[in-house]
Amino acid sequence: MSAQTDGPIEPLIPMPELTPDALRAAVARIAPSRIPALTQHLFEATTNAQQTQSLAPLRAFVHSWAVFVAIQRRPERAARLHELERLIDEGEQDPTAAITEIRMIWETAEAEAGL
């Protein structure tokens, strides 16, 4: 089920620092349509962090958007993820292999991001 390429393809951008500003700048370059979602998520994370006096919501924000950037900065990886998600949404095949591959994509993205 895995798509193979002739060799490594360079990412669109380097992996940014794991800060809200750096992640926002990266998203602005590779997926500008997602800036409103990032901004809303950051607002909610900041509000929740203040209300709970915990950094956990901000850590979850950074984790989520770092993985997003790590996936999206490699168009072939992002395309494969979307294809796998589409296959699962259609519900016409056993999703086990697709779920396994999605998990591998996420784990690779987390490792690239240093998470």
Image (cartoon, helix red, strand yellow):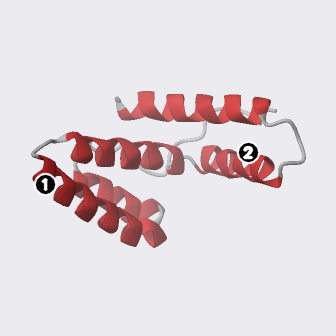
Residue 109 horizontal side relative to residue 15, left or right: right
Residue in the image at 60% along x and 51% along y: 75
Label 2 environment density (alpha carbons within 10 Å; few <14, some 14–19, many ≥20): many
Label 1 environment density (alpha carbons within 10 Å; few <14, some 14–19, many ≥20): few
Give the CA distance from mark 2 to mark 1: 37 Å
Residue type highlighted by circle 1? Gln
The residue singled out by tag 1 in the image is 51
Q: Quadrant of the C terminus?
A: top left
Choose between 61 and 81: the one closer to the eye: 61
Residue 25 numbered mark, or none? none
2 vs 1, front mark: 1
Task: Return the x and y of residue 44 as percentages of the image width and height.
Answer: 26, 61
Give above or below for 32 relative to 75: below
Task: Return the x and y of residue 23 as percentages of the image width and height.
Answer: 31, 53
Residue in the image at 38% along x and 35% along y: 113
Residue in the image at 9% along x and 45% along y: 53
Q: Secondary structure at mark 1?
A: helix
Residue 61 horizontal side relative to residue 92, left or right: left
Q: How many marks?
A: 2
Residue in the image at 52% along x and 29% along y: 108
Q: Secondary structure at mark 2?
A: helix
Task: Return the x and y of residue 10 as percentages of the image width and height.
Answer: 53, 42
Residue type highlighted by circle 2? Leu
Residue 63 horizontal side relative to residue 76, left or right: left
Q: Is residue 2 visible?
A: no
Choose between 84 and 91: the one closer to the eye: 91
Residue 84 numbered mark, or none? 2
Q: Is residue 104 visible?
A: yes
Task: Return the x and y of residue 26 as percentages of the image width and height.
Answer: 36, 56
